[in-house]
Image (cartoon, grey):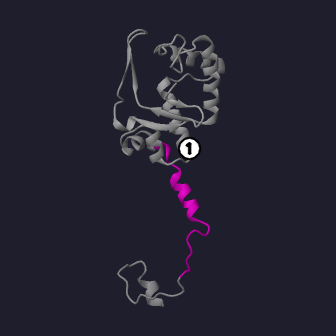
Amino acid sequence: MDDIDFETGMLIISKTLYYKTMNDYKFVEPKTQASNRTIYIDADTIKELQEWKAVQAKVLPNCGFVLSYNSTPTSKTTLPRALEKLANLAGVHRIKIHALRHSHASLLISMGENPLLIKERLGHEKIQTTLGTYGHLYPNTNIEIAKKLTGGVLSYQSASQSIANYTSNQHTAMYHKEI
């Protein structure tokens, strides 16, 4: 829990858990340099984590892991099973743990967040990874750009006469000759 600042919501991601068994695990360097990052967690999530920390402290007073029931990292199968049970209770389709990461990225995109900020939050080394994975979620942004450009962003005055006395465009040649 040392990697979470419960006051500011800052979460430091600086290691990856290699988990073989409950007694055979270790922390290793993340895959890439960009995987080492600091992100901020929303206030609702911080509140939930603080409530869990209080409950956990009653059972495991010196536990250094967020999701632990026995002072060791949670088993690889515990979270997927819990997610499946909760999905069944809620009557929704179960998704895999890693899909939560994709859901988070998709939500940020739908909120209009900058792809560079999403790249940093996800820990991608290159923006191409982020755009290659989530680029299909940006199809309507072109329409939004057109809407933003309409309505006074650009000002112009329509031409009342042609100032060109020549044209090589066969479709506008008659226009220039008439004026």
From the viewer's perspective, is residue 144 above or below residue 26? below
Q: In this view, does 39 lie to the left or right of 20?
A: right
Q: In this view, does 47 lie to the left or right of 14?
A: right
- Secondary element at image label 1: helix
Query: Magenta stretch containing residue 78, yes or no?
Result: no
Q: In this view, does 100 lie to the left or right of 129?
A: right
* Amino acid type indicated by mark 1: Ser
Q: In the image, residue 132 lies at what x, y percent?
A: 39, 42
For the image shown, how many numbered marks are present on the structure?
1
For this rendering, which residue is in front, 138 or 116? 116
* Residue for badge 1: 110
For this rendering, which residue is in front, 166 or 134? 134
For this rendering, which residue is in front, 101 or 162? 101
Other residues around mark 1 within 10 Å, as few (<14) / some (14–19) / many (≥20): few
User: Residue 111 lies in what quarter of the image?
Assistant: top right
Q: Which residue is drawn at 65% across and 23% down?
A: 51
From the viewer's perspective, is residue 140 above or below residue 54? below
Q: What stretch is highlighted in magenta?
A: 136-158
Q: Residue at x 55, y 77 (%)?
A: 156
Q: In the image, residue 47 lies at what x, y percent?
A: 64, 29
